[in-house]
Amino acid sequence: EPEVTQTPSHQVTQMGQEVILRCVPISNHLYFYWYRQILGQKVEFLVSFYNNEISEKSEIFDDQFSVERPDGSNFTLKIRSTKLEDSAMYFCASSEELQGINQPQHFGDGTRLSIL
Amino acid sequence: DAKTTQPNSMESNEEEPVHLPCNHSTISGTDYIHWYRQLPSQGPEYVIHGLTSNVNNRMASLAIAEDRKSSTLILHRATLRDAAVYYCILRDAQGGSEKLVFGKGTKLTVNP
């Protein structure tokens, strides 16, 4: 069964440094998402991306964050200047376009980001 | 987003059925009921969804109350691999939002 893959599985970065988290969504999917989960807390939506542009973003997704689909297979999340509070699991997800709202979102296993 | 209420935790024995409840008394007519689960150290995983009628798939069954103010996810024979946090999520078909709004969910423990 096709799956969403994320790399790296664990990223350790110094505060203030830039970090790029990478995702390869399922190949025929057209909607892409990033979520995060701070340890012990709920899974939180960050951003959705469709047709090469952001379709929705949360209050968390401020100017420090950006997303890009640099080629036909990758989807990236960049944090420009990391803060301690950015430490979390970051999940990428993708879904098909057909029937929109009721298409399941398929999640990767996440990248654990640790900010020192 | 309409709110859902789930028990914080439930426990089951292996090979027994599990009924995971969800209350959504403020559900609107265009809200679909979705269930996801999150196994330890993994991302969320879609389980099932429905609108009014009961639904079955290879993973589970979804029983929806006639007034739609509650629903129950049924695992017919729990296995150790079903130990996870289960999330009941409402998605508005007319809301235009693609995001999933996760609550705290129900942590299911399966005893051998």
Image: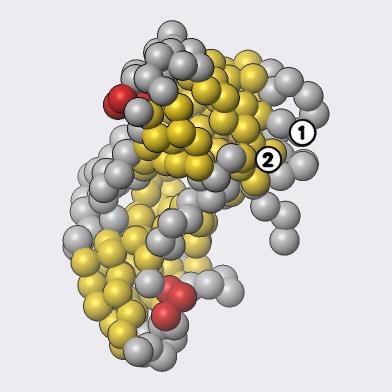
Label 1 to label 2: alpha-carbon separation: 7 Å
Dot 1: chain letter: A
> In terms of image quadrants, where is residue B70?
bottom left
Q: Position of residue B36 (x, y in %)?
A: 44, 56
Tag 1 near tag 2, CB within 8 Å: yes
- Determine the residue located farthest toward the top in the rendered image: A63
SS at mark 1 in the image: loop
> Which residue type does callout 1 highlight?
Ser
Horizontally, residue B6 falls left or right of residue B56, namely: left
> Which residue type does callout 2 highlight?
Pro
Would you call the spot at circle 2 few (<14 residues within 10 Å), some (14-19), or many (20 or more)?
A: many
Pick the front one: B34 or A69? A69
Would you call the spot at circle 1 few (<14 residues within 10 Å), some (14-19), or many (20 or more)?
A: few
Identify whether A15 is placed above or below B72.
Answer: above
Horizontally, residue B111 falls left or right of residue B80, namely: left
Q: Is residue A72 visible?
A: yes
Report whether mark 1 lies on the same chain as mark 2. yes
Which of the two discs, 1 and 2, labels the residue nearer the N terminus?
A: 2
Residue in view at x 48 percent, y 51 percent: B43
Pick the front one: B94 or A22? A22
Dot 2: chain letter: A
The disc at residue A25 is 2
Pick the front one: A63 or B56? A63
Horizontally, residue B24 falls left or right of residue A15, namely: left
The disc at residue A73 is 1
Quarter that holds the C terminus of chain A: top left
Identify whether B92 is placed above or below B84.
Answer: above
